[in-house]
Image: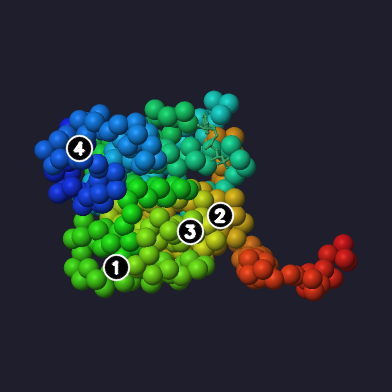
Amino acid sequence: MKVDPLMLTLGDLTRTHPAFADLLAQTGGEGAKPSRTVASWLASLTDERLSDIGMGREQLLSHIVALAEQVEALKAPSQVTVRSLTILGGRDKKGEAERLDLELRAGDVLCIVGPTGSGKSRLLADIECLAQGDTPSRRRVLVNGEAPDPSWRYASDRKLIAQLSQNMNFVVDLTVGEFVAMHADCRMVEDRDRIVDEVIACANELAGESFSAAVSLTQLSGGQSRALMIADTALLSASPVVLIDEIENAGIDRKRSLDLLIASEKIVLISTHDPILALMGTRRIAVRNGAVAGVIETGADERANLAVLERIDCELMALRHRLRSGERIDAPLAWAGLLAKD
Ligand SMILES: Nc1ncnc2c1ncn2[C@@H]1O[C@H](COP(=O)(O)OP(=O)(O)OP(=O)(O)O)[C@@H](O)[C@H]1O
């Protein structure tokens, strides 16, 4: 049963959710007595105290609720083995039938491509909520070939489906090592220290700039936190299905991220505008006007073009690195001759 975090006492909360101890240490104030409920503590915070913390009452409450849900999701691994997900067509934005019967199996990693506003996020959201004809697209999603048990749709404490969103909002000031160790503890893995080292080493391979276990989560760059989330999801997450809204803006190694996710034997869907990422998979889902227009196999010619795109990307990355290091790039670029021929 889902517990309302507002009705818990601060003592209970810090015991069941160690991360709250840090939040309280930063924000608590004199009224943060263990016997007090969260609701009463929040009501007791003066406007002055809230302005010291730099957060409004509503914002603090939503942080607490989000943190409680995250910790619950980590604690109770999904009980359901997902061998397949089937997405059955609904209606496009004009109300016309979407012809779709797509089965995804464990180990499938697919990109979703399509113009802005075409419905990529809608498709991810339909999967996340295991839609049953009750979303704007009217799609239905089956788990292992059957309509899912209604309780799976709303069980935030038994997440079948994890969504990595664009922004990683870290509430508490834990170090990277403490954060990953907390996940490992929640999932009761054996050999915790080895797994923690592995996740951090792996995240460092994905991130452009390396970071240590001792650094605070709040100090990580966008790319570093995204790399940490991907490594953590692939190596530690209990959710059999992972949805990712955009990887490309984070400046991380896309090929390795994809390989890592493929090896994790989960079903992974990534919405993207990035041609390299889209061509890296064996299949991609093309969305248009609110409906899936086709599932495209990556062909041999496309793979050859991918190799060229990767070289261009590599050169762009090198330029980016030089510019970021304060260098000038006055020397003519290798491609200048190529473009002059046009
Ligand atoms: N089949 C559909 N029926 C009705 N509305 C839809 C359908 N598909 C998408 N929409 C709506 O269209 C809008 C744009 O869709 P969405 O945000 O999923 O696009 P997107 O491809 O993710 O765009 P972007 O690339 O800009 O992130 C949303 O309001 C979404 O709910």
Which tag is nearer the camera, tag 3 or tag 1?
A: 3
Quarter where residue 127 is shown: top left
Q: Disc 2 on helix, strand or loop?
A: helix
Identity of the residue drawn at 22% across and 68% down: 192
Q: CA distance from mark 1 to mark 4?
A: 36 Å
Looking at the picture, tell me which residue is in the foreground, 156 or 47.
47
Q: Position of residue 146 (x, y in %)?
A: 30, 41
Q: Which residue is mark 3?
A: 221
- Amino acid type at image mark 2: Asn
Identity of the residue drawn at 74% across and 70% down: 328
- Of labels 4 and 3, earlier in sequence is 4
Which tag is nearer the camera, tag 2 or tag 4?
A: 4
Q: Which residue is mark 2?
A: 249
Tell me the crowding category of disc 2: few under 14, some 14 to 19, or many 20 or more residues within 10 angstroms, Cα based. few
- Of labels 1 and 4, earlier in sequence is 4
Which numbered tag is attached to residue 31?
4
Q: CA distance from mark 2 to mark 4?
A: 42 Å
Q: CA distance from mark 2 to mark 3?
A: 12 Å
- Amino acid type at image mark 1: Val
Task: Check the picture and name the quadrant holding the C terminus.
Answer: bottom right
Give the residue at the far right of this rendering.
341
- Amino acid type at image mark 3: Ser
- Of labels 2 and 3, earlier in sequence is 3
Which numbered tag is attached to residue 196?
1
Tell me the crowding category of disc 1: few under 14, some 14 to 19, or many 20 or more residues within 10 angstroms, Cα based. many
Q: Position of residue 93 (x, y in %)?
A: 56, 29
